[in-house]
Amino acid sequence: MSDNSADLIIHNANIITLDPKIRSAEMIAIKGNTILAVGGKDDMSRFKSSNTKVIDCDGKTVIPGFNDAHCHPIPFAITMRYVDCSPSKVKNIAEIQARLRQHSEGISTAKWIRAAKYNETQLVEKRHPTRKDLDEATPNNPTILVHDSGKLCVLNSLALKLVGITKNTSDRPDGHIGRNDKTGEPDGIIYGRNEQVEKGVPPLDEEELRQGIRMANHDYLSHGITSVHDTTWSNSLRHWKYFKEIKESGILTPRVTMFIGSDAAEEFQKSGLNTGSGDRQLRLGGAKIALDESTGNDQPSQEELNRHALQAHRAGFQLAFHVNDIYSLNTALTALQFIVRNDPKPCSRPRLEHCAFCPPEFIPKLKTFQAIVATQPSFLYYLGETYRRDVPAQQREWLYPLKSFQDQGVRTAISSDSPLFPCNPFTGLYAAITRKDRTGYVVTSQESIFLLDALAAYTIWPAYASFEETSKGSLTPGKLADLIVLSDDITKIEPEEILNTRVVLTIIDGKVAWEG
C-alpha cells in the first residue's frame, strides 16, 4: 500500500469544510486518525486501494464534528440515571407523579428515587410540585426532583427526614427552604444550593455512574459531538484521574478538555500539569473562577480575585471566568487588567463562560484582552419566556449579543451547558440564527448570525478556545478525522427545519463511532 493510500474514504457527499481555502468538496480521504485529503469526486482514485473502506454518503452533508465548549459530562451522566421529567415528557404534575410511581415499581423502599429536568413554567399548573405531590407518588421511597435550572429541587417527606430538614431547620446562606405560609413546615422546595441536601442524598454507586456515562456517551455521539470541554468548577486532580480511567475503558468516546477549579491549580502545578497537558483524547484546559451567585459559591472580593487569578495564571493555566451578570463581567475584566499590570507573561486566550448579559460598552474591552466567550444561545430557546418575564426590556437587548461579538472581533464558542439543558447542538444553531424561544417569540433579532458563522462557533472557535485550532475545527488535510454526516443540507433548509436535523454518522479518530 502506498503512503497515499487511505484507510477510509467518504465520497458522494456535500462537504462543508469550514476551511476558507477549501470551502466545499465531495470527497474526504482519511489515513489513520488524520484527514489525508479533501477534494472532488475525481480525486478519489488517487487515494483508494484494495484495502480502503469506502462510505457513499448519497449526497448527504458532511461537516466537522461539534465541539461543545461548555458542558459537564459527569453531572450529565448522573442525570442520565434520573427519571426524566423534562417538558417533552411531562405536561402537568400528574404526569410527573405517574413517571415517579412507575419508576418506584419493583425497587426496594429504601432506594432513593432521583428525577430531574422539570420546569414549572411548562407545566399546566404553572407551579412547582411540593412534598405532598411527591408523597402521593412515592410515599415509601425517598425522592428528589431537580429543576431544569439546577438551582432548586423538591424533596418528599421521607427525603426531608433523611437529610434532616424540619420545621426548625434554619435557612443557609447557599439556599433557603420553602415553607407553608400558615404552619412554617417545609413544603419540600429547596431553593439554591443546600449543603444539607447535597450531603444527605447519596451519590450513585460506581456501576450506576458508569451506566450513566455510557448513556451520556450515546447522547453525545448521536448528536455529532466529537469533543467536549468539561467546565465543572469543582474539578480536581481526582477528577483528572477518573477521566483517565473512563477514557481508557472506552466508555466515553468524545475528546475531553477538562477545566479545573482554580483552587486546584497549585496541586496540578505540583504534579507537573497545566493547560495543554495530556494528549488528544484527554487534555487539561483552563482554571475556572466562579464570580456570580449562580454557582452557589462564596464570591471573592476584587482583591481576592485578583490574587487568585494571578496565582492560577502564574501556575500556567488559561483563565476561565464564570460570568452571568454585569457585576461579575466587570470584576473579571478588572482581574485581567490586574494581571496585565503585574505579570510580564501574556494572559493567553482568557475565557468568559456564559456572558449571558453583555452591554455594548463592554465588548471593546473583551476585544482588548482577546477574550473568548463560551456562551449558550440555546438558553434563548429554553428560557425565552423567563427572560421576557424577569428581564427588563433594555437589558434583554444585551442577551447573548452574538452579532455584536462577531462584528467587533470577539471570538465566540457556542455550547450547551448540559445537563442544565440538552446537549443537542441543533438547538444552539437554531437559536443563534433565529433568536426564537420555543413559543416562536424572537429575542433581540438584530443579534442573529448566519448559519456558517454559527457552525464555526460550534467547531472552529471551540478548538481555538482550547489551543487546538491546528488539529481540529475544520475538515482540513492534516487535522484529526472528526466529522459527522447529517440527514439534511442545513445550508439550504428553512431555519425551522434545523431543529429536526439528525446526525446519521459520527466519525472520531477516523473510525465510525456511531451510526443512526
Image: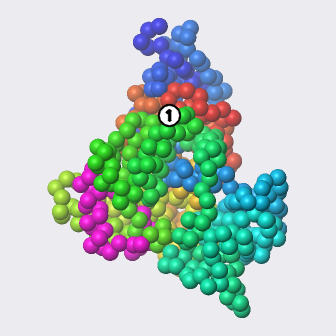
Give the residue at x 66% y 32%: 515
- Tell me: 321 left or right of 1: left
Which residue is nearer to you in this view: 471 or 187? 187
In the picture, the quarter occupied by the C terminus is top right
* Residue 281, horizontal then vertical, whole percent: 45, 36
- Residue 53 makes an appearance in the image: yes
- Residue 492 makes an appearance in the image: no
Give the residue at x 58% y 37%: 251
Magenta span includes 371? no
* Residue 443, horizontal then vertical, whole percent: 57, 67
* Residue 246, horizontal then vertical, whole percent: 52, 39
Find the residue positioned furthest to the bottom: 182
Which residue is nearer to you in this view: 477 or 230? 230
Give the residue at x 47% y 33%: 475
- The residue stretch that appears in magenta: 298-327
* Residue 133, horizontal then vertical, whole percent: 78, 73
Check the image and report above or below for 172 versus 270: below
Which residue is nearer to you in this view: 475 or 490? 475
Magenta span includes 300? yes
| Mark 1: amino acid | Glu
Give the residue at x 53% y 13%: 48
Q: Quadrant of residue 53?
A: top right
Residue under label 1, please give it: 248
Check the image and report above or below for 5 versus 35: above
Dot 1: within a 10 Å radius of its alpha carbon, few (fewer than 14), some, or many (20 or more) residues? few
Circle 1 sits in a helix, a strand or a loop, which is it?
Answer: helix
